[in-house]
Amino acid sequence: ERLPALVAAVRAAGHPVSWLCDPMHGNTVTTGEGLKTRYLEHVEREVRGFLTAVRSADGTAGGIHLETTPEDVTECVRNETRAHQVGEKYTSFCDPRLTASQAVSVIAAWRD
């Protein structure tokens, strides 16, 4: 909601900016079992919303920050209906990470 106005104000002030999307941190939830996870559908929705907001104010969407692992883990899942899968392969000591295929799915949302 506020991002387009912020992008427009920074642009009007003449500051050269490349905006970065960080869809991971604001989308962390805790399962009923107490494990932190992220739902891909929320992360992808935030990426699309970011792009729409920045582009609507003629800003430059310059990049995306993702937390990933090459390991085959189940720390992030597609949506809440798959939350039961989160604990199957959970090796993170901190925050849940995307697998390589999940990262590709998020990047595909950037291209849409």
Image: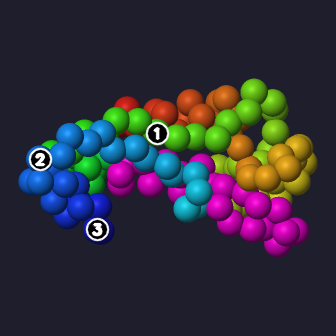
Q: Residue at x 11, y 54 (%)?
A: 13
What is the C-alpha distance between the residues marked 1 and 3? 19 Å
Q: Which mark is residue 32?
A: none
- Front in this rendered view, residue 7 or 108: 7
Residue 74 screen position, x and y as percent: 80, 45
Residue 72 x, y percent position in the rendering: 81, 32
Tell me, yes or no, whether the highlighted magenta stretch contains residue 56. no
Per the image, label 3 sits on a secondary structure element best described as: loop
Q: Residues within 10 Å of mark 3 (few under 14, many from 20)?
A: few
What segment is highlighted magenta in the picture? Answer: 28-50
Measured as percent of width and height from the top left, residue 25 is found at: 59, 57
Report, in whole angstroms, how far the alpha carbon at label 2 lies from the one at label 3: 19 Å
Which of label 2 and label 3 is nearer to you?
2
Which label's residue is closer to the chain start, 1 or 3? 3
Residue identified by numbered label 1: 64
Q: Which residue position is annotated with label 3?
A: 2
Say which quarter of the image contains residue 84: bottom right
Amino acid under disc 2: Gly
Q: Which residue is mark 2?
A: 14
* Discs 2, 3 touching: Cβ within 8 Å: no
Q: Is residue 10 left or right of residue 99?
A: left
Query: Residue 32: which quarter of the image?
Result: bottom right
Crowding at dot 1, Cα within 10 Å, few <14 / some 14-19 / many 20+, comes out as: some
